[in-house]
Amino acid sequence: MKPTILLYDSGMGGLTIYDAIRQTLPNAHYLYCFDNAYFPYSERSENVLIEQAVKIVQKIAEKHPLDMVIVACNTASTVVLPALRSRFSFPIVGTVPAIKPAAAISESKTIGLLATKGTVERPYVTELIEKYAKNCVVEKLGTTALVEIVEEKIRTGQVNLARLQEVIAEWQTHPTLDTVILGCTHFPLVKQELQQMLPNVKYFIDPGNGIANRVSVLLQEFPSKNTQQNGENIAFCTKMDEEFAKREVIMQQWGFKRLELLNFS
Ligand code: DGL
């Protein structure tokens, strides 16, 4: 049986996680929701993030029996996992900043956490740093602009390099920073541009492969129970706007059959 895996994010950044997973599990049945009604999540309240998580998963699960949900968003994962796990019985996988591998690989023991404004402030992240990076200096850079830059890149193919440079300017002259955690699922999509602008950084830590491995292990532990599914990969959004047709084409290029509007009313 093909497992049905739902991934969701505020936007299209979660496709970086989807991309890593589908390389390991090319035949799974994928559903992807981007919550464009609430994009960007960066500075949204914790209550909004929890409400949206529950609503999205509930709504999609009504029509598509799910085997697993991947919160393909760090901003949401640092808040919504307990709420989802208490309501749904299938495994819920989160995406949280890869502090542990970054602390292990850094030679200068100076690591940068590049994430949204919400993520860098969360107690969850402070605890991860306390637990795994006590021996490191951890620089935090919280940005909403970089999420918007990436979303624009996905839509237009263009990166606003001047704006990107403004975002990371303070790290360009950092004397010891050698490792950067891409702590938002959007950011691997501008990894090359970041590498060019931060030539002294040796390691950019992208969580995609780690999550893909975790998903494979979980699917062995919790094999698919779905018996009725047509197997079409479908994308969902939460708001109809003038970009719908364009986004549908993009989602089709990523292997989804069509884009549907999730109707909560
Ligand atoms: N891609 C998301 C993350 O990993 C959210 C970005 C946003 O909407 O602010 O944090």
Image: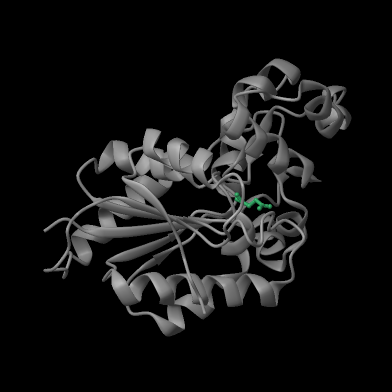
Q: Within the image, what quadrant is residue 112 found in?
A: top right
Q: Position of residue 29 (x, y in %)?
A: 25, 53
| Residue at horizontal 88 percent and vertical 31 percent from the top | 170
Q: Position of residue 218 (x, y in %)?
A: 28, 60
User: Would you place residue 92 above or below residue 154 in this image?
Assistant: below
- The residue sitting at the bottom extreme is 87
Quarter occupied by the N terminus: bottom left
**Residue 230 seen in the figure:** yes
| Residue at horizontal 60 percent and vertical 56 percent from the top | 36
Q: Position of residue 159 (x, y in %)?
A: 69, 24
Q: Within the image, what quadrant is residue 150 found in?
A: top right
Task: Pick the residue in front: 260 or 55.
Answer: 260
**Residue 176 seen in the figure:** no
Horizontally, residue 72 falls left or right of residue 140, namely: left
Horizontally, residue 99 falls left or right of residue 8, namely: right
Horizontally, residue 59 falls left or right of residue 49, namely: left
Q: Position of residue 13 (x, y in %)?
A: 55, 44
Task: Pick the residue in front: 200 or 229.
Answer: 229
| Residue at horizontal 17 percent and vertical 58 percent from the top | 230
| Residue at horizontal 81 percent and vertical 31 percent from the top | 168
Task: Pick the residue in front: 26 or 172.
Answer: 26
